[in-house]
Image (cartoon, rainbow, N blue to C red):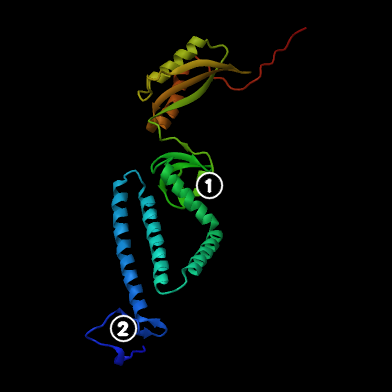
Amino acid sequence: MDLDLSEMNFNDLDYGVLSKVSIGSMALSTLISAILTFLACFVVIQLVLRALERILKRASRLDATLKGFILSSVRILLWILTGIIVAGALGIPTTSLVALISIVGLALSLSVQNILSNLFSGLTLLISKPFRAGDYVEAAGKAGTVKAVGLFYTQLNTLDNIFVSIPNSDVTGTIICNYSREPLRRVDRIFSASYDSSTDDVKAAVSDAISRDIRILQDPPPFVRLSDYKDSCIEYTVRVWCRTADYWDVFFNLNENVRECFAAKGVEMTYNHMNVHILDR
């Protein structure tokens, strides 16, 4: 530090005197100005972040992961701006600094392109909310219960309890089927019966099977109609409604009850076969 005490009056120390004091090639006044600028920026950052935290707490619809990402992104941006402002206060050319930051940012974005794709896809999922944790969905060729929606991966548990992590870009780039979103779900089944069984007997047997399960709703009403004539059988389409949580229980119980009711009413459940008639000439 080059300090000339002969030119300083300690009873009348002002900015002009400080400007004559230097640390290396930097004037002490410039350094003090940069420090004050940094402190001011630090105070502003704290105020902005606290205000943002209060705003995000009130936004109950936003996912907690998304809130954390927004807060972290704003914090990083504010500190980058602080670095540029302080550099300007120190006399460092900020134009070159901004250009350097831009080039580095571009290089990083190209090198982590897949990561950024998953990141923005994760933000899309968190904002649009096509599904939530606990929903049973099918996406990117996988089906299971959603455990978590992160910024990079969507995590599922399949029916056979396999934990699957799917990149978010794959999820947003495909059709998403959410089986849990609606409170009610329709069970569609097709049952076959012999040509020898009358339509009324078949429909009565199916109706009896439906009435055995109290989880099957009567509104909307069950649907039982003859739908197609096949080579070896007649097909009957059955559609019933139930609560979404009861879907699989209703599905399997309906299969079992129809078989029992067909047997009770003498309705034959056929299978593919060929009838050969030998003509005696």
Residue at mark 1: 170
Three-letter residue code for mark 1: Asp
Rendering quarter of residue 60: top left
Camera-side residue of 200 and 118: 118
The residue under the point 50% across, 45% down is 171
* 62 in relation to 42, above or below: above
Q: Secondary structure at mark 2?
A: helix
Tag nearer the camera, 1 or 2: 2
Mark 2 highlights which residue? 17
**Element marked by disc 1:** helix
Question: Where residue 110 appears, x then y in whole percent?
Answer: 56, 59
Q: Is residue 80 above or below residue 189?
A: below
Q: Is residue 140 rendered to the left or right of residue 86?
A: right
Look at 47% across and 16% down and name the residue there.
224
How many residues crowd around disc 2 within 10 Å: few (fewer than 14), some, or many (20 or more)?
some
* Residue at the (50%, 15%) spot, across then down: 225
Choose between 165 and 71: the one closer to the eye: 71
Mark number for residue 205?
none
Q: Earlier in the sequence, mark 1 or mark 2?
A: 2
Observer-nearest residue: 21 or 210? 21
Expressed as whole percent of the image width and height from the top left, the position of residue 13 reads 26, 83
Q: Is residue 113 visible?
A: yes
For badge 2, the amino acid type reads: Val
